[in-house]
Amino acid sequence: MKETSTGEGKLITNLWEGGEGPQNRFMDGPFAPIEHEVTAHNLEVVGKIPEELNGRYLWCGPNASPFDPEDPRTYSWFTGSGMLSGVRLREGRAEWYRNRFVRDELTTPHLGVPRLPGPEPLSRREPYRDLTGPRFVEANVVNTHVWAMAGRTYAFAEAGVLPVEFSYGLDPVARCDFDGTLNGSWTGHPHRDPDSGELHGFSYFWQWDHVSYQVLGTDGKINKRVDVPVGGRPSVHDMAITARYAIFLDGPLQFDDRAHQEGYDWPWAWDREKSVRWGLVPRDGGAADVKWCALEEQTYTTHILNAFDLPDGKVAVDACTVPKLFLDDLTGPTESVSRLQRFILDPVTGSSKVETISAEGLDMPRLDDRMTGKQHRYGYFNRLEGAGAIARTDFEKQSTEYYKYEAGKAGIESIFVPRTPDSAEDDGWVLGYAIDVPTQTTEVLILSAQDLASGPIARIKVPSRPQYGFHSNWIADEELEQANI
């Protein structure tokens, strides 16, 4: 192992000695760089694609750029240049697969293409343009999520990075600040209100002493912003909404000046001294109305499944959490196994209670998005520890069902798609992808949500390996057609 110092203690980086010097696990195997953009038509299908699925299944993730070799000692999985991938399904056919670089300041010179048009990132604006920030922020690396809003398709990231708009065929169009309404930083993990269609998120930036609760309206513009002082510089990847609140964790993952000075690509590190609390921002209120609920033990929410209001005024939050992250290793989330926990928050007393539902490494939670902010029964996860699997948890029966990946294959997030707009909560399909590392190929999997154990009802053969991670979405053609009316 190699060691270097950061903060007050020692940082053991996730390196080993290889034939060409130190290696980083997030630059090898399923994480290895993708060097080419691929377009493939009329994909082979084993089984039958449901004819109701007309649209695009898209995913976004980091690619350890082959054009801009990183120092394995300081490279983080979280900061690889983005790549957008996906398949287009129509009337039971898989019409195409495409993967495209999300053009940033690191990749465009080597691709031989112009810099994307659009507004300048926050780091290039006053009063920040003379400060040297994290490398991925300076380069506007967008690598985290993909969403559609107001008839447009976007790749999202966080920490001061502007969204990038894409065409239907996944070609990058421009950097975007939602027609000048964004304060310069958006989120990598918004949540959509199923009743209003708005996207809600919390954004942060390495030079801010606050986080910003922002709401993106169906017109494609930010229509609400609340800056919440936090007295630190936390990383807030995920959040939740209920009918009454927008919710985030003010946690121990804080910007670390020494890690930044020493050149670590992701200079947010675990602060052992930081007290942890949930922030509940009333959706009809401002910064002065925020309710805080303290936690007794340090924890960090990697991802949040959902939250909902309880009849007694308390709030339930179902989240995947870790007891330690970026304390001994800044290359990626390697230090502890994810737990699925339910937090009960009391905005009157400022207290909280926590119950562990599962400690077996379930993460990347998704639900039927029609249940966002409402009491749900089902959640869909990927088991990332040990034998990889897609999981479906029934919170009412307190049971979990699995589809286990075949040997040599790995996946990272699966999503639920309802059969019809008014079908029952669990009536639909789970979509995911499985990378076959030995053959460098991929299968897009379609499973019955109510019977994961029986395996895929359709496997779509993709003749290449996409990037591994992070988040994905199903964007129905009908959604874009309605937005363009």
Image (spheres, rainbow, N blue to C red):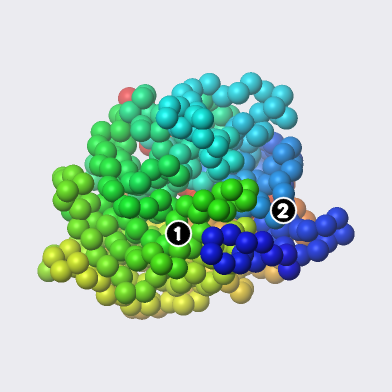
Q: Nearer the viewer, residue 485 or 310?
A: 310
Q: Nearer the viewer, residue 436 or 190?
A: 190
Above or below, 152 against 465 in this view is above
The residue that mark 1 highlights is 253
Q: Are marks 1 and 2 in contact (CB under 8 Å)?
A: no
Image coordinates for residue 182, horizontal then vertical, percent: 36, 32
* Number of the label disc, if any, that sits on residue 72: 2
Residue type, numbered disc 1: Leu
Labels 1 and 2: the sequence-earlier one = 2
* Mark 1 → mark 2, Cα distance in angstroms: 22 Å
At label 2, counting other C-alpha atoms closer than 10 Å, the crowd grade (few under 14, some 14-19, many 20 or more) is many
Q: Quadrant of residue 183?
A: top left
At label 1, counting other C-alpha atoms closer than 10 Å, the crowd grade (few under 14, some 14-19, many 20 or more) is many
Q: Is residue 1 left or right of residue 450?
A: right
Image coordinates for residue 469, horizontal then vertical, percent: 58, 53
- Say whether residue 78 is visible: no
